[in-house]
Amino acid sequence: MQKLVIEGERRLCGELTVQGAKNSALPLLAACLLADGESVLHNCPQLSDVCSACRILGCLGCECRLEDHTVTVRADAPCGCCVPDELMREMRSSIVFLGAVLGRVGECSLSFPGGCELGPRPIDMHLNALRRMGAEIKECHGVLRCTCPEGLHGAKTALSFPSVGATENIMLAAVLADGVTVIRNAAREPEICDLAGFLRGCGARIKGDGSDTITIEGVTSLHGCEYTVMPDRIVAATMMAAAAAAGGELALIGARSGDLDAVIPVFEEMGCRIYPYSDRLFVTRSLPLKAVRTVRTMPYPGFPTDAQAVVMAALAKAKGTSIIVENIFENRYRHVDELIRMGAVIKTEGKVAVIDGAPRLYGAKVRAAELRGGAALAVAALAAEGVTELTGVRYIDRGYERLEAQLTAAGASVKRLLE
Ligand code: UD1
């Protein structure tokens, strides 16, 4: 087991390159399964989840090569249709393989993803939509067995909530289905547009991605293509929170301000200056932080739930009272008790967190319980007096490529040690 040892109160200064988006790379890897021949994905983050996705592709009969930040997938004749239980458990988001396997192979068997660190993660919308497209799905002892006796056909689906994963699964199933699929109340996240961009590069016919109605006209086959994964907007938001918490100036190379339209104004309200220039986004914080008006997490283009924890960590030392309302996940305040150990004054009730900015935070022994909450503890540690020992690093490693190296290069003191 490893831990991060962070000595706080050092201003950050320098350039950081924003890694490729994990939440885009995973559906893109699933999408590779649909294309004949070779697909090449550049800018894939080097994360354990990406390795797990490659292992899944291997189990499904694809050749998969990982070199530096490029993954090459050859999916000429995928033969498997089972995602092994241990890989499903390792990565809950492997549910996104369901649509792709069904689309390419016509049947799929995988274990039910169940809950995760953020509470229950139902997949009812994924399954209902796939059923409308002709899939027969049986749930038996925690295993989902899906077949398409008459192949998949296009269908109209209106999602009751713009679920990112359900939208991706439907798109993946629809590109090779017979006829036209229309997704209403579709997720509008930039990762959806990235997936659509890759699939179009492979020959798919998709319109409307980025809006709430996506139309997909099925084609008979797709060919591989070369594509670059979009930059990770949540990693960019985390680095903005780090600059806000520690003070200083960071240049976030590759960060796309358009993906962060709901996040940037929150940091500006805190007193940060943020401006894009050329291929980068500059974040400067020189004055003490101020509290902000209510931040409500929403589906895109609203404020992202994945940035809630890191923003809260920066607000823990901002003068005044801030309020956060978490509307997407039930169990997404697990970092709060740990922030309180560091001197933060935060109360939660249901969806609402009230943050009374504390004049000081103190280094403490804290434990990450999930990915973004773990990153939030690292952000708070940068602003805290003294040394923080952060355990549960494996959660952070699921989404951040060498976080300690990135922060150290910008002037922070972060060491990775054995627990
Ligand atoms: C994706 C992201 C995750 C992000 C989330 C919301 C990936 C790998 N993960 O997760 O980082 O926090 O979007 O932006 O891209 N729901 C149902 N039934 C369903 C599907 C979802 O009730 O069939 C609910 C969920 O429990 C949750 C909400 O809808 O409360 C949003 O979930 P969804 O958008 O599907 O998130 P994920 O795709 O799982």
Image (spheres, rainbow, N blue to C red):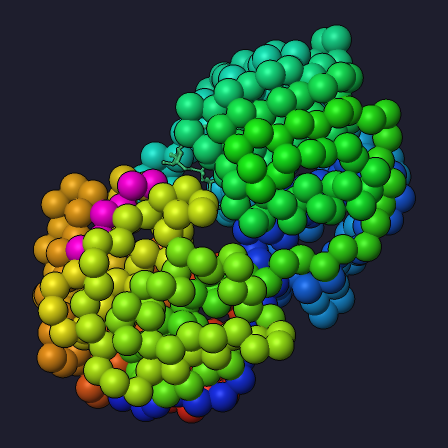
In the depicted structure, whether residue 112 falls above or below residue 242: above
> Residue 71: horizontal and vertical position, in percent?
74, 58
Asked whether 325 falls inside the magenta stretch, the response is yes
- Is 271 positioned to the left or the right of 185 in the image? left
In the depicted structure, whether residue 115 falls above or below residue 45: above
Q: Nearer the viewer, residue 126 or 162?
A: 162
Report the number of numbered marks: 0
Query: Residue placed farthest to the top in the image?
Result: 150
> Residue 1: horizontal and vertical position, in percent?
40, 68
Q: Which residues are magenta?
A: 323-328
Residue occupying image coordinates x 67% and y 57%:
229
Residue 364 appears in the rendering: no
Residue occupying image coordinates x 48% and y 65%:
235
Residue 9 appears in the rendering: yes
> Residue 149: horizontal and vertical position, in percent?
72, 9
- Is 390 positioned to the left or the right of 135 in the image? left
> Residue 354: horizontal and vertical position, in percent?
13, 56
Q: Nearer the viewer, residue 88 or 348?
A: 348
